[in-house]
Amino acid sequence: MPMFSRYNHFLPWQNGSWLAYNARSGAVALMDKKQYAAFGDLSQKMIEGKMDNLTQAERELLLQLQYGFFVHVDDFSELDWLNFEHLRARYAETVLALAVAPTLACNMACTYCFEGDKRGRMSTTVAQDLIEFIKKRSQRIRLLDVTWYGGEPLLALDIIKEFTSKVIDLSSQCGFQYVSMMITNGYLLSADVVDRLVELKCTGVQVTLDGPPQMHDKRRPLKNGLGTFRTIIQNLKYASAKMAVSIRVNIDKSSSIEMIRQLLAELKVANLESRIGINYAMVEASTAACAGIADSCYGSIDFAKVEAEYYSLLLSEGFFIGKLPVPNNSYCIAQQINSFVVDPDGDLYRCFAYVGDKSKSMGKISDDINYQHPEFTRLFRFDPFVDEACRACSILPLCMGSCPAKRVDRQVSRELICSSWKYNLEPMLKIIALSRLQQMQQVAVAAKEEV
C-alpha cells in the first residue's frame, strides 16, 4: 500500500495551482487545478485503502508522485534510508575533501573577521607533508576536492601553484579526479591571476561583497584603510567569464533592503546579473575574535525573514536565484571522516572557524590520524538520528541536524541551531519557482527571436 512521504510540502501557487516539494528527493512539481483535484481524490483513496479503484489519471499521477519520492511503499522506512545514506557519507573514503589555508595572513581588516589578526605561511616542508598525506590515500580515493582558504589564499599563490602541479601529476598516476575552488576576498583576483587559477583547475571562487561601496568599504577595507569594492567589481567582470563566481553577502542587523538594492544596482551596471550567483549569509559571533559583534547578529528565525525578503528583491531585479533546498547526506566536514581543514603549520581541524586555533587541532598531517582524538570526536559524535526533534523534522534531509559546532561550542537554543529553511521554506520555494519560470520565459523569447 503506498504512503505519503513525511517530507512532503504542498503550498498554494498561482491561479489555483499548487507547488509540491519533497525534501528527501529535492523534487519540485507544479500541479494545475485538474491535477490537484486528482491528487485530492487519490489521497482519499490511499487513506481509505481503495487502491484497486483508481482512474487512469490517478494511476499516472501516482507513478509521478512515486518518481519524485512524494509517495513510497508502506514497508519502506524513510528515516532508516536517510540514516543509511548519512552513514555512507560519514564514513566514505572515496572522496578526500580538504580546505587548505596556505596562509593566515590577509590584506583586509574586516570588522567581523572570526580569525582576528593571524599570521603564518605554509613552508615547503608542510606543503610536501600535505602531498604525502594525499599520496597515502591516493589508492582509495576517486576524487580529491580542495577548497583554498585563509587568510587570503591569493597572498600565497606561489604555494598553490607548486602544490597543484604536484597533485595533478599524482592524480594522473593514481587515477583520481582533482577539483578545486577558492574562497577569496577578490581584491587580488586580477585577470592574469584568474587565467592562472583556471590552468590550475580552480573552477570557481566565492567572493564577499557586503553591500554597496560605502558600506562594503567600511566593513571590508584594506589594512591601510583604503576601499576595496571598485577593484573587486572590476576583477569579477573578467573572472565571471572564465569561472563560476558566487557572491556572498554577509547579513547582520546593520543590513537593509535599501543596501541590498544599491548593491544589486552596482552589479547590474557592471553587467554581472546573469553571470554570477548571489547568496546571503548570516554573520555569527562564532569565535572569541568576533565576540564583540554578537549584539548585531541575527538569530535564525529573524534571519530567515530578511533572507526571504532579500531573495525576493533579487528576483524582482532580474537576478537568477541559485539557492535551492537541496538534500544533503551530511551537514559539513565535521560529520565526514575523510574531510579536514589544514592550516599553514599542517595542523588538522574539524571546522573552518577553528583554523589557526591550536587548542582545536586534532593533530598534524605528518602524523597518523587519531580518530579517538577529542578534537575529532567532539564534533563528529553528533548524530541527528538520535535527536528526537531532528527525527521528527520535515526538513531533516536538508540540514542533517545543522551545525555541530553550534551544539558543542556555543550550546545555543534549538531555534538558533536550526537551518533558516526551517522558517522560510515556503516563501523561498515560491521565490525559486518564480525564478525558474522567469528563466523559462526568457529562453522561450530568445528562441522566438532566433527564428
Image (cartoon, grey):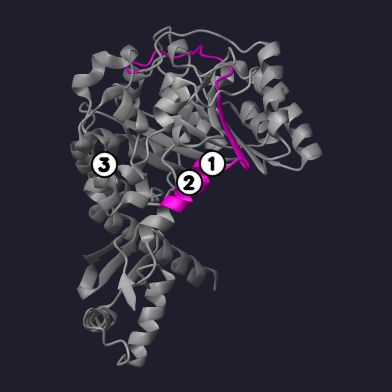
Q: Position of residue 122 (x, y in %)?
A: 62, 13
Q: Is residue 313 visible?
A: no
Residue at 32% from the left image edge and 63% from the top image edge: 21
Residue at 44% from the left image edge and 43% from the top image edge: 330
The nearer-to-camera label among 3 and 2 is 2
Q: Residues within 10 Å of mark 3 (few under 14, many from 20)?
A: many
Say what secondary structure mark 3 lies in: helix
- Check disc 2 and report the residue beneath it: 87
Residue at the far right in the pictured view: 173
- Check disc 3 and report the residue beneath it: 307
The nearer-to-camera label among 3 and 1 is 1
- Residue 91 got which mark? 1
**The quarter of the displayed image where residue 374 is located:** top left
Q: In the rendered view, does 350 fall on the left or right side of 259?
A: right
For the residues labelled 1 and 2, the Cα–Cα distance comes to 6 Å
Q: Residues within 10 Å of mark 2 (few under 14, many from 20)?
A: some
Task: Tell me the kind of residue under disc 2.
Answer: Leu
Q: Earlier in the sequence, mark 3 or mark 2?
A: 2
Q: Position of residue 124 (x, y in %)?
A: 70, 12
Residue at 19% from the left image edge and 39% from the top image edge: 301
